[in-house]
Image (cartoon, coloured by chain):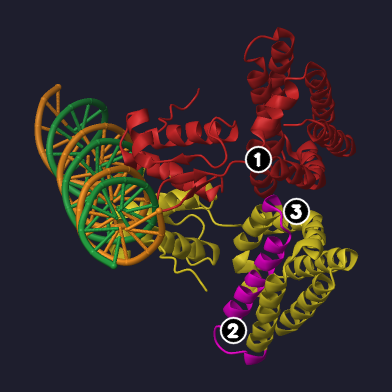
Chain colours: A red, B yellow, C orange, D green
DNA sequence: GGTGTATATTATGCATACAACAATTAATAT
DNA sequence: ATATTAATTGTTGTATGCATAATATACACC
């Protein structure tokens, strides 16, 4: 039985704005105003302001005293985030091999099926759907580590490079390889094989990083 | 010439609440209410709510629909944060050796002098003062890396273990060693010696972690 | 034409009012 | 006495109003 949790307007606005910034709909340097957003979204300034405070805490938006300027994630930021992931994602996978639950493994399997489905589909917004499955897969991996510190740190890094991940998986060959790498990680986790999990996760990050590095975006 | 920046009430409240949570004044599990904080601090709920949204974004406080529960940082969280720092702080120092400015080096030197002063002092709240110098030193190191990703990630981790760092440096022998380790990092940075900087930073994190691990706090 | 100043505009910062909701306690019917 | 319902209390969620700060604009003056 699923608990029915009401999502507040402020939360919805946060999610939408975060997505719009991280996908590049609002570009680096663009200036927004609470009043304008308030009018566009049809709500008062209060929930807007609360969402904005959270975005400021994530360092992807900044108040200036005269409008808010979008910071977003530069290509350089993205590459540095991979440098960090290179050094800790393997360890998170190692932890996950020991701690992941059967339920989490089941959900992971589901994301693999959907990822495969969206890759075969190849229609208009399939890159976004593939990317969202990538997000869910990694979220489950980080959760499965059982470590709050790894979960928080890696989740923040992975989420912030959303835009670049979309671009990457829009290349069919990379999307297919990414799926295979996810499957290798899943297999190691399901077997609770720490060594294999660490190796597979590191391999996946290395390949993703290399793929990103040679894109011009 | 220094720009005069007014700090908003909401920002001040954020800083105070964050500090109170991270130092353990508000303990894990404790329930707060906006109205109570509003009355205690003598401001309306609006700036309180904005501060709370930022604390929620940091995962150290959580709304429950009936009050807000303090999450804080457990000992296990702290140890995992060291595991992460062990893997990336050396690289940040390597970057800093290449990118740190003379101004940042000058400020770093100043924190070393103050750290030394407070260690010698050994009065009532000297542990807090030493810890704050530790914060400033590492903040300068992360800034000096010139990488936003490293800065954000490491800064968040270092800040969150505030409580444990205070406890650690309240032990005089550890405080002295920590100062020496900082000096070694500074020396390498001032010489722009990447290898030495990485080695010194890693050594410092290893020793700090080991010191923490054998404390019972 | 250039410069200083007043003014208008537009933004954020904070306080307050009210609605909605959940939990607890009191009241009431059976 | 117990179960059910109603009232009370305490909480968060949202809208709105007003003060203040920052910037742009207009204009007088040299």
SS of the residue at dot 2? helix
Q: A210 above or below B123?
A: above
Tags 1 and 3 both on a single chain = no
Q: Which residues are magenta?
A: B120-149
Task: Residue B29: give x, y in percent of width and height.
Answer: 48, 54
Q: Is residue A116 left or right of residue A16?
A: right
Which mark is on residue A155?
1
Q: Is residue A180 magenta?
A: no
State the predominant SS element of the stretch in magenta: helix
Q: Is residue B128 magenta?
A: yes
Q: Residues within 10 Å of mark 1 (few under 14, many from 20)?
A: some
Q: Is residue B134 left or right of residue B188?
A: left
Task: Residue B148: give x, y in percent of width and height.
Answer: 67, 52
SS of the residue at dot 3? helix
Q: Chain of mark 3?
A: B
Which mark is on residue B126?
2
B176 vs B101, nearest the viewer: B101
How many circles with numbers are drawn on the protein? 3
- The residue under label 3 is B84
């Amino acid at each position: 039985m699923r608990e029915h949790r009401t999502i507040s307007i402020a939360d919805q606005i946060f999610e939408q704005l975060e997505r719009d910034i991280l996908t590049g709909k609002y570009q680096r340097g663009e200036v927004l105003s609470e009043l304008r957003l308030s009018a566009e979204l049809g709500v008062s300034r209060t929930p807007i302001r609360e969402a904005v405070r959270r975005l400021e805490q994530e360092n992807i938006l900044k108040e200036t005293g005269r409008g808010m300027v979008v910071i977003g994630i530069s290509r350089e930021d993205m590459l540095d985030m991979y440098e960090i992931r290179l050094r800790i994602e393997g360890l998170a996978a190692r932890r996950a091999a020991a701690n992941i639950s059967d339920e989490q493994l089941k959900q992971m399997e589901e994301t693999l099926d959907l990822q495969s489905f969206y890759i075969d589909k190849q229609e208009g917004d399939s890159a976004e759907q593939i990317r969202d499955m990538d997000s869910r897969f990694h979220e489950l991996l980080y959760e499965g580590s059982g470590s709050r510190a790894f979960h928080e740190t890696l989740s923040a890094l992975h989420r912030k490079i959303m835009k670049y991940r979309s671009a990457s998986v829009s290349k069919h060959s990379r999307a297919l390889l990414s799926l295979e790498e996810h499957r290798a990680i899943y297999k190691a986790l399901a077997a609770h094989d720490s060594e294999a999990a660490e190796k597979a996760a590191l391999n996946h990050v290395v390949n993703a990083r290399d793929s990103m590095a040679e894109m011009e975006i």
